[in-house]
Amino acid sequence: MAFRIGKSVMLNFGGDLEPLFIFAGLAFLLVIGPLLRWYVLAMTRPNFKLHKSYYLELVPFVFIFILSFFINKNWFDTNNKQVIILFGSVLIFIYLHLAFYIFSSGRIVYNLKKKNKNSVQTKSQISIIAWLNAVIIGFIVIWVSYFLNIIDDTVPYITGPIVYSIAIYFLSYKAFQFKVTDIDGDVFKLNDKTALFNKISKLVIDKKLYLETDLSLSSVSKLIGKTTQTTSEVINQYAKQNFNDFINYHRIQDAKKLLLDVNSTNFTISSIAFDIGFSSLSSFNSAFKKFENTTPSSYRNTGSV
């Protein structure tokens, strides 16, 4: 494979360009990978700083760039198999190096999405994740088009620059659309209100406090040590619901499971309503219809068909 790739590139460029320009140009591909990763880190980590250790990632670039000054043009004027294999091996390393950094950057974005999956995200956080997804996809498309080009001209050479141009225009549009020039990793900084809502969610949802009939805004506020006004404001801001709807929504999700559970067919609708925290059947019916646009009995009958 190294022989095929080396021969392909040498035949394309060897007769027209000095080896210095060929190798120097390829060497700069070894800069793109680290820059991509650093950019993704800066956009996903609060107060990101480029530590000195990061500069070690530029060692491959420095090595290949310096090596380019010692390449003899005669190498391109011969059909020496060893030279072609050496050149092809360097090319493979360069393209795999970029592929590794694209994968690494994509992994950072994936882990960030996974980490924030169960958390309420701000508009800026959503924009950054969507933007970085677009960047990763753009780099993948560019990498594939250029890599296929050097393998015995699998695709015409002009395809690479065309795909690259389209990708750049697309990413420029996305950058404008998401307004990424105005935001950075600081949007993922855990502020007081975010931490407070996560605490409320852990109590109400994870510990299933919503199943308690006497659960109130006042009781939740006491548990987290905040005023009822603060608790209400945080729930409104992050859940986009008032306290009662926030609690009832999770009760209704449990009710839906019980209504369709074959092991709960003997349970009456009223017993289910009381089991999930409602104090009356009428309040359960009203809440169920509000969220599901149907009655509990209709939902059960439809689901059992």
Image (cartoon, grey):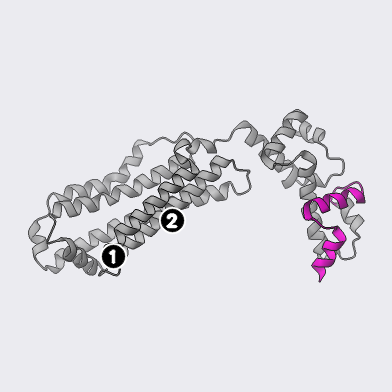
Please identify the quarter of the rendering in which residue 51 is found: top left
Q: Quadrant of the C terminus?
A: bottom right
Q: Earlier in the sequence, mark 1 or mark 2?
A: 2
- Where is mark 1, residue-wise? 149
Q: Quadrant of the N terminus?
A: bottom left
Q: Position of residue 57 (x, y in %)?
A: 32, 45
Nearest to the observer: residue 78 or residue 161? 161
Label 2 CA crowd tier, 10 Å (few <14, some 14–19, many 20+): some
Q: Secondary structure at mark 1?
A: helix
Q: Is residue 277 magenta?
A: yes
Nearest to the observer: residue 34 or residue 169? 169
Tell me the magenta residue range. 276-305
Question: In the rendered view, would you say 103 is above or below 11?
Answer: above
Residue at image location 51% in from the left, 52% down from the top = 110
- Separation of marks 1 and 2 at Cα, in angstroms: 19 Å
Kind of residue at disc 2: Ile
Q: Is 290 on the left or on the right of 163, as rendered?
A: right
Q: Is 185 on the left or on the right of 270, as rendered?
A: left
Q: Judge whether residue 7 can be spotted in this image.
A: yes
Q: Secondary structure at mark 2?
A: helix
- Where is mark 2, residue-wise? 137
Tag 1 and tag 2, C-beta contact below 8 Å: no
